[in-house]
C-alpha cells in the first residue's frame, strides 16, 4: 500500500485464492485442529477453498499439505506473508545437508526439475488416503529417466512441451489413463505407475532419513 492509502496493485483472482488459503490454514493451525487430522483430511479442507474451475487446485493443495507434513513447524505451510506462492522446499538430511524438493501430481508442469534433488510425485491423487502414502519420492536423475522416451516401449511421447501463460516453454507428462481420462493411454499410465513403484513413498523416505 502506498503512503496515500491507495493500493499499488488491484488484487487479482490468484491473490484472492492465496488469501483464502492462508486464512483457512491459519484457522486450522491456531485451533490445533490440523494436528489431529490426517493429511488427506487437511487436503479436503484446503481443496474446498479453490474454485471448481481451477485446473491446478489438486496440485496446489497437495503441495501445501505435504509441505506441512515435511515441515510441521512452519506456520504458513510455504505461503509467504506477501502472498507469493512458495519458495524452495528444503529438507535437512541425516548427513546435515539439505535437499531441494519439488512436489507434482499427474500432468503438472515439470519446469523445476533441474533445480531439485527430489521429486515427490503422485500420478493420480486419492483423497481417501493420506498423501504421504501416495506420493513417491524419486531422485531427480531417476525421474528424468522416467521422462525419457527411450525407456518407454509404447507408441507416442512420454512428455509434451507447451508454452505457458508467461510465454515460457514447459514440460509435462502426456495425458495418461485414469478414471477421469478414459480415452487416454493405458500403456503410458502403466509405465508411469510401474516406474513410480520402484521408489519409496514419502513416509518411508522420511523414516529412512531418521
Image (tube, rainbow, N blue to C red):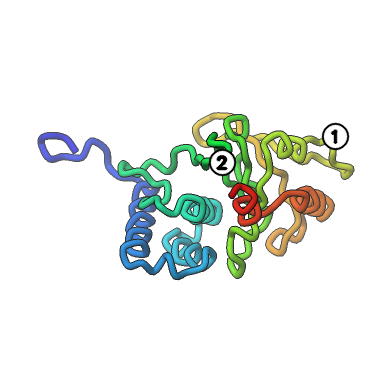
- Nearer-the-camera pick, 11 or 59: 59
Q: From the viewer's perspective, is the residue at label 2 or at label 1 nearer?
A: 2
Q: Is residue 136 above or below residue 87?
A: below
- Nearer-the-camera pick, 75 or 110: 75
Q: Residue at x 73, y 60 (%)?
A: 178
Q: Quick check: marks 2 and 1 in contact, CB under 8 Å?
A: no
Tell me the CA gap for discs 2 and 1: 32 Å
Q: Residues within 10 Å of mark 2 (few under 14, many from 20)?
A: few
Quadrant in the picture for the N terminus = top left
Residue 104 in the image: state x and y as whole percent: 60, 47
Q: Residue at x 76, y 40 (%)?
A: 146
Secondary structure category for the residue under label 1? helix
Among the 4 quarters of the image, the one containing residue 158 = top right
Q: Is residue 59 above or below residue 28?
A: above
For this orientation, the residue located farthest to the right is: 153
Mark found first going from the N terminus, 2 or 1 = 2
Secondary structure category for the residue under label 2? loop
- Nearer-the-camera pick, 54 or 100: 100
Q: Residue at x 47, y 64 (%)?
A: 42
Query: Is residue 54 visible from the viewing direction of this image?
Result: no
Q: Please indicate whether residue 5 sits to the left or right of residue 207 in the image.
A: left
Residue 18 in the image: state x and y as whole percent: 38, 50
Instruction: Give the label on residue 198, or none.
Output: none
For this orientation, the residue located farthest to the left is: 4
Residue 153 in the image: state x and y as whole percent: 89, 42
Q: How many marks?
A: 2
Q: Which residue is mark 2?
A: 93
Query: Is residue 195 visible from the viewing direction of this image?
Result: yes
Q: Which residue is mark 1?
A: 150
Residue 60 in the image: state x and y as whole percent: 50, 51
Q: Residues within 10 Å of mark 1 (few under 14, many from 20)?
A: few
- Nearer-the-camera pick, 137 or 164: 137
Amino acid at each position: 500500500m502506498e503512503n496515500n492509502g491507495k493500493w499499488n496493485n488491484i488484487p487479482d483472482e490468484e491473490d484472492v485464492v492465496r488469501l483464502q488459503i492462508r486464512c483457512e490454514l491459519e484457522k486450522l493451525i491456531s485451533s490445533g485442529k490440523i494436528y489431529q487430522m490426517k493429511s488427506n483430511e487437511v487436503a479436503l479442507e484446503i481443496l474446498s477453498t479453490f474454485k471448481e474451475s481451477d485446473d491446478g487446485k489438486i496440485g496446489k493443495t497437495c503441495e501445501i499439505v505435504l509441505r506441512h507434513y515435511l515441515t510441521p513447524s512452519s506456520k504458513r505451510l510455504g505461503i509467504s506473508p506477501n502472498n507469493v506462492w512458495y519458495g524452495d522446499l528444503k529438507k535437512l538430511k541425516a548427513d546435515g545437508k539439505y535437499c531441494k524438493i519439488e512436489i507434482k501430481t499427474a500432468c503438472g508442469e515439470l519446469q523445476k526439475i533441474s533445480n531439485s534433488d527430489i521429486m515427490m510425485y503422485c500420478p493420480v491423487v486419492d483423497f481417501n488416503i493420506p498423501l504421504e502414502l501416495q506420493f513417491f519420492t524419486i531422485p531427480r536423475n531417476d525421474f528424468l529417466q522416467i521422462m525419457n522416451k527411450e525407456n518407454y516401449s509404447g507408441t507416442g511421447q512420454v512428455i509434451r512441451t507447451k508454452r505457458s501463460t508467461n510465454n515460457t516453454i514447459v514440460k509435462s507428462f502426456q495425458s495418461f489413463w485414469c478414471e477421469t481420462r478414459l480415452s487416454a493411454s493405458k500403456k503410458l499410465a502403466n509405465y508411469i505407475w510401474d516406474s513410480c513403484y520402484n521408489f519409496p513413498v514419502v513416509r518411508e523416505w522420511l523414516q529412512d532419513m531418521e
